Image (cartoon, rainbow, N blue to C red):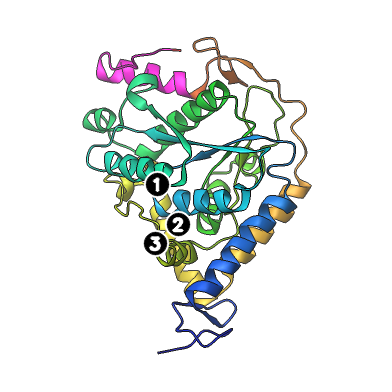
Amino acid sequence: MVKCSFCSNDAILFQSYSQKFFCGKHLSDLTEKRVGSNMRKHGMIRNRSRIGVAISGGKDSLAMLYIMHALLKKDRSRKLIAITIDEGIRGYRDAGIKCAKAFCKTLGIEHHVYSFKDFAVPMDTIMKKKHGDPCSYCGVFRRWILNKASRKLKLDALAIGHNLDDVAQTFQMNIMRNEPLRIARFTPNGGLVDCDDFVPRIRPLFSVPEREIVAYALHNKIEFHNAECPYAHMALRNPIRDFINSMEEKYPGTKFRMLNTYLSLLEKLPHQEGLEISECEECGEPSSVKTCKRCEMLAKLKRDTRGVGPRKLK
Ligand code: SF4
């Protein structure tokens, strides 16, 4: 058995970009250190007391909640509140919600579930009637509900479990789609638009590779939901993930180099001071255009499917 590069324990992971082997304990220490340093360096919880954590029941979000809970449990000035979105994907999301609920109960963390069926249209209903990229609907509806729920729960920030792989893929996708504004908005801490109605998103895992989070979760016996979404194979993200993974294999450190390029670019992008945020004419949520993307998509779905719609319009 190969040994850890830092002690005599058996290794559970090889980091090709550092050429080091890690046992469970040293990998855990490194992961927690990275998350803590991301939070401090980017001021993710500075002057913020009610911190939301978006959890799906998967490895990333539960590992993030576990680490944040460990880092903040002695801090009486801060409270963690977990939120799960039920996208309405039978046999997939229900199992994730079960894991999320059980995990929050173990840690003693308040947990809320909000559903597409109340504020949008369940993904199963959309996919019965339509073809195309399911993730574009899912992403827009999820972001809209998360923001609304975060305001309702009076959160000062909302933590999202995006890891290094997600950041590299999103960066690459936004380049390929020619969406520089989306690059500007996908920041480790908040976005470039200051608006009280947008609850800032924080990404404490943004520099942690996905495979290290899996190893961390397994080592710490976190019971996460490990299935793949039945619509994931249709997503544009898949070929991009494969491409970046193959580059990482050939050229270790590729994902970190992409992250560093993205962080340097962020510093150079101008603040979107000129961008006026008002209210969507349909739902009253913050929007830079007359009708927000969620309401535009709902109207299109209603036309195409003859009438599907949310239970609660606003
Ligand atoms: Fe939604 Fe796409 Fe994720 Fe499935 S893979 S949960 S459709 S974003």
Residue 240's disc is 2
Q: Amino acid at mark 3?
A: Lys
Q: Are marks 2 and 3 in contact (CB under 8 Å)?
A: no
Q: Earlier in the sequence, mark 1 or mark 2?
A: 1
Task: Determine the secondary structure under disc 1.
Answer: helix
Q: Quadrant of the N terminus?
A: bottom left
Q: Are marks 3 and 1 in contact (CB under 8 Å)?
A: no
**For the residues marked 1 and 2, what is the alpha-carbon distance in whole angstroms?**
32 Å
Whether residue 306 is in magenta: the answer is yes
Residue 120's disc is none
Name the dominant secondary structure of the magenta segment. helix
- Up the image or down, 266 lies above or below 274; here it is below
Q: Which residues are magenta?
A: 294-313
Q: Is residue 214 visible?
A: yes
Q: Residues within 10 Å of mark 1 (few under 14, many from 20)?
A: many
Residue at image mark 3: 221
User: Quick one: 132 or 17, which is closer to the camera?
Assistant: 17
User: Quick one: 144 or 32, which is closer to the camera?
Assistant: 32
Q: Looking at the picture, how far across and down is residue 43, in whole percent?
A: 73, 46
- Up the image or down, 203 lies above or below 248; here it is above
Q: Is mark 1 within 8 Å of ligand 1?
A: no
**Which quadrant of the picture is home to ligand 1?**
top left
Q: Earlier in the sequence, mark 2 or mark 3?
A: 3
Residue at image mark 1: 103
**For the residues marked 3 and 1, what is the alpha-carbon distance in whole angstroms?**
11 Å
